[in-house]
């Protein structure tokens, strides 16, 4: 029978264990379990609140031999406790893959070997029952089924609700953005094609491709600009920034 420890002794042992780390802590926990609890990791978990796995490992390290009753003495704990669902149901993995793989895609950034699927665990469970003939009692819950999908190499992706289309002001570039509808303009030919076929308010803008190299630092004198000033109307409040250019010189009036 395990020794009876007072509340003060239990508190002192727990405080001492908190000061330790790693192998030293496991050795201390194993020594306490062996001296006061007949080497029972489960009792150490009940009395001191320690994790039984850590105490099990500490007892193995202390004695240099496997502890009776842990994982049936199989290295790594394989075979311990209840078998996994995919071990109980032989065809589960094949059936899950046949349902999920057609609705999955690889990581677009190729940073993970997982395949992403938009099917939820609840949908997979319902499909196994409706299409594969499984009984509801034979299948685990949604949370366990999510872990099973992860073990099979699938990651669940949340389905994002459709966002409203962003409104773009009807200026030339905004019309071009809506016209090309996300098409990547990665070549000059594509850019020219989409610019030539766009329309704004029923009018197709004039378009030409400029392939010349402009020289920097070139300025025109006031005398050179004077012939063009009659086509330019400047705002009275913002003359430097608000400018309207009228290509028809005959009947243009600018009242400011």
Image: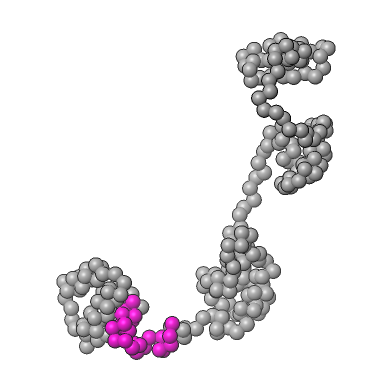
Question: Measured from the top left, where is residue 12 in percent x and y?
Answer: 18, 71
Query: 256 or 124: which is nearer to us?
Result: 256
Q: 143 or 13: nearer the eye?
A: 13
Tell whether 118 sits left or right of 206: left
Indicate left or right for 27 with 215 as reference: left
Q: Relative to 196, is 238 above or below?
A: above
Relative to 119, does residue 253 appear above or below in the rendering?
above
Q: Is residue 60 within the magenta segment?
A: yes
The quarter of the displayed image where residue 203 is located? top right
Residue 72: x, y in percent? 41, 89
Q: Residue at x 43, y 85 (%)?
A: 75
Residue 58 placement: quadrant = bottom left
Q: Please report the bounds of the magenta region as a residue range.
A: 54-76
Say which quarter of the image contains residue 16. bottom left
Residue 65 in the image: x percent, y percent? 33, 88
At x 66%, y 15%, the residue is 235
Which residue sits at x=69%, y=69%? 102
């Amino acid at each position: 029978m395990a020794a009876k420890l007072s509340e003060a002794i239990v508190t002192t042992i727990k405080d001492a264990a908190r000061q330790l780390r790693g192998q030293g802590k496991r050795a201390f926990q194993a020594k306490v379990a062996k001296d006061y609890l007949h080497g029972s990791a489960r009792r150490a978990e009940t009395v001191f609140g320690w994790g039984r796995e850590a105490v099990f490992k500490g007892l193995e390290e202390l004695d240099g031999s496997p502890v009776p009753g842990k994982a049936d003495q199989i290295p790594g704990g394989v075979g311990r406790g209840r078998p996994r669902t995919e071990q109980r149901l032989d065809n589960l993995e094949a059936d899950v893959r046949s349902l999920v793989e057609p609705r999955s895609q690889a990581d677009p950034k190729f940073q993970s070997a997982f395949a992403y699927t938009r099917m939820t665990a609840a949908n997979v469970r319902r499909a196994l029952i409706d299409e594969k003939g499984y009984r509801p009692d034979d299948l685990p819950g949604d949370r366990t089924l999510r872990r099973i999908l992860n073990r099979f190499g699938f990651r669940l992706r949340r389905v994002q609700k459709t966002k409203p289309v962003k409104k773009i002001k009807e200026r030339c570039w905004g019309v071009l953005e809506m016209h090309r509808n996300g098409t990547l303009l990665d070549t000059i030919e594509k850019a020219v094609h989409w610019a030539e076929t766009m329309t704004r308010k029923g009018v197709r803008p004039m378009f030409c491709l400029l392939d010349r190299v402009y020289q920097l630092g070139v300025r025109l004198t006031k005398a050179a600009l004077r012939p063009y000033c009659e086509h330019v109307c400047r705002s009275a409040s913002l003359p430097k920034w608000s400018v309207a250019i009228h290509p028809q010189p005959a009947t243009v009036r600018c009242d400011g």
